[in-house]
Amino acid sequence: MESVVIIPTYNEKYNIKIVLDKIDNLNIDLDVLIVDDNSPDKTADVIKELQKSRKNLYLIERPKKLGLGTAYVKGFHWALEKGYKYILEMDADLSHNPDDLPRLINACKKGADLAIGSRYSDGVNVVNWPIKRLLLSYSANLYTRIVTRMPVKDATAGFKCFKREVLESIDLERVKSSGYSFQIEMNFRAFKKGYSIKEVSIIFIERTEGQSKMSKAIVWEAVFMVWKLKILSLLGRLR
């Protein structure tokens, strides 16, 4: 297959089968890579059972919770080694609708180097978020756009598709951030290398099962990351 979607998991056993069933129902050629951080709820065991009947499902198990950013970097390396042309990322908590995966792939097939499933490219398309969370997210993206001058309305989105050339051009070992800031950093690195970015409007629905991984540390990391990226870019040290 030419496409793979990477899904990091940590305590997602109640959601992951639903997500995988929805992906299977798309009837498209798409492999799935789960990167599990030794979930205490035994998410990996659920995946191993599902692998018995799904030839397109792969699993990387890590020894402990090491962060979203490093999970994606691990998955990116794996996907590049396997030769995939289109490499996607999405959450396991059902906030990202698998039905939008073909739209992201098609955006790249039609010319985009990076397609982002955007909550803010066509108004505000977020369901079931408290107003405080929505304002935080929207403000973070506005702040990022002002500081970096990156023409992306939803720079913190975690639902996207990369052409392999984009990931091959980025020194992934230099990417150390996580959460919001990981998404910002990957977008900015692609942007500064001159790759085309297209936002595909989606509807984001807050998780109904499990707990959000959001924390104050993730927010503050993103606040400082945009300035770090801008300074590295000005110094010509962004790789």
Image (spheres, grey):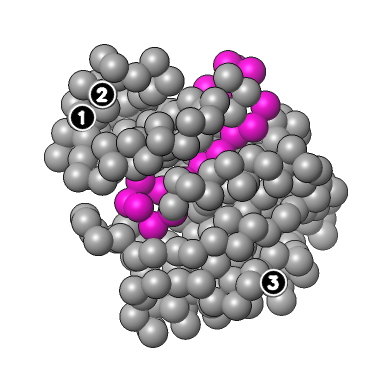
Residue at horizontal 35%, vertical 46%?
92
Q: Along the horizontal axis of the image, is 57 left or right of 149? A: left
Q: Earlier in the sequence, mark 3 or mark 1?
A: 1
The numbered disc on residue 50 is 2
Q: Position of residue 206 (x, y in %)?
A: 35, 65
Mark 2–mark 1 CB contact (< 8 Å): yes
Q: Along the horizontal axis of the image, is 12 left or right of 199? A: left
Q: How many marks?
A: 3
Check disc 3 and report its element: helix, strand or loop. Answer: helix
Q: Position of residue 200 (x, y in %)?
A: 64, 58
Q: Is residue 87 magenta?
A: yes
Foreground disc of the pair 2, 1? 2
Q: Along the horizontal axis of the image, is 33 left or right of 87? A: left
Instruction: Return the residue nearer the eye: 30 or 71.
Output: 30
Foreground disc of the pair 3, 1? 1
Residue at horizontal 20%, vertical 29%?
46
Label 3 sits on residue: 145
Residue 4 visible in the shown view: no
